[in-house]
Image (cartoon, rainbow, N blue to C red):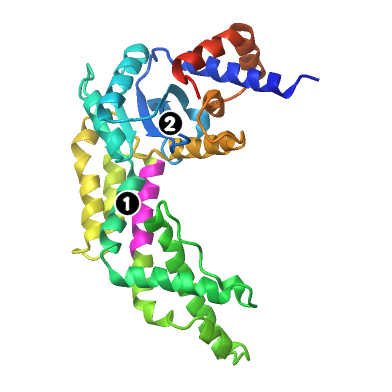
Amino acid sequence: VPHFTTGIGWALRLGLHRLQQAQRHLAEPWVCIADFTRQIGCKKALIVLRVPVSALSQGSALTLQQVEVIGLSLGETWNGARVKTVLLALFARCGWPSHAVSDCGSDSKKGIVETVREAPKRASWISDVRHVVANALKHFSAKLSIFQQFQSLCTRMRQRLQHTRFAFLMPPKARAKGRFLSASRQAAWGLHTLAYLEARAREASPDVSALAQALRGLKSFTLFLITFVRNTTCVKQVMKIVKTQGLSAESIQAGQEALSALPVRSPIRKEVSHYLQHYVPVVESSDSPLLGSSDVIESLIGKAKQRLEANGRSELHKSILLIPCLCGARTQDLVAEALSTVRVQDVTTWVSENVGET
């Protein structure tokens, strides 16, 4: 039976093979998706994915089977200039994308936008729809004192309900990241819980008084909860349209129709509508729908985080080569080819050049 370190070595050789095979010119147009992993230790990694335009089939979101990793760069400090340097070298080797998609992070957006402007053929940068919607909710909700009050009430209510017979009614936890999108779960919980309380009151249940005491203060937020759920339901419908259909004249029109459920003066409606309208000229110059979501790279980073944290070392090291293994189809022929063409020394060389001392 091979030692477990041998198995790790095989996986790293497969990852390096996938990375090297992906760094080639593609005959058809393709899309670039780029994002950073979270910082682990003193470093974080810039991951660049390639998606053939033919894979952007309407009606379904992208999966990891349809993408491949073409760029994997580690660094302690990142800024727009360094991102641009890395991408220019990568695109010189792999060819230029038709457009690039990323979130609005300050450390990545500037470098990506400046890079695509230097493309030999016209290329565009597209902001991830999920981050646009989250920012729209943030800009609206963060200013509302009632939003902060509701979040505080949810925290107090968790303390009241835990370790009681009503613990099944505890509100969902607030998330540190993406809390304005995830807050819709808390708002929906509030409406469902109020409906449950009213149903128990109609039944004249003996627990009603104790339940009402535990849920005190929630009823005063009813109007806010109805409005918040309406807002998030509407913008999530727009997200679903863009994620599954891409950005096209039809999907932009469908998104604008979905936004019509919000008041005309709603700042959320204005911000998301402006996002859709901004890409109308880009869509008109394209023969196929454009990718408007970077969810697939978020999924990849989440899976990579599980693999890297399982190692038990709080730093980025050679295990970063496992990330290319998570994309595309893994077949016996592919593994056989990887193990017959990539040597252990090749992995050692790549690690020394790209990872360095840990």
Residue found 63% across the figure and 91% down from its top: 206
Q: Give the quadrant of the N terminus.
A: top right
Disc assigned to residue 133: 1
Q: For residue 118, which quarter of the picture?
A: top left
Residue 38 forms part of the magenta stretch: no
Q: Position of residue 210 (x, y in %)?
A: 57, 87
Residue type, label 1: Val
Q: Position of residue 46 (x, y in %)?
A: 40, 29
Q: For residue 184, which quarter of the picture?
A: bottom left
Residue found 53% across the figure and 17% down from its top: 16
Figure disc tally: 2
Q: Is residue 36 above or below residue 201?
A: above
- Range shown magenta: 231-244
Q: Nearer the viewer, mark 1 or mark 2?
A: 2
Q: Position of residue 48 (x, y in %)?
A: 40, 26
- For mark 2, does the 10 Å Cα neighbourhood hold few (<14), some (14 to 19), or many (20 or more) residues? some
- Would you say the residues marked 1 and 2 are in contact, meaning their CB atoms lie under 8 Å apart? no
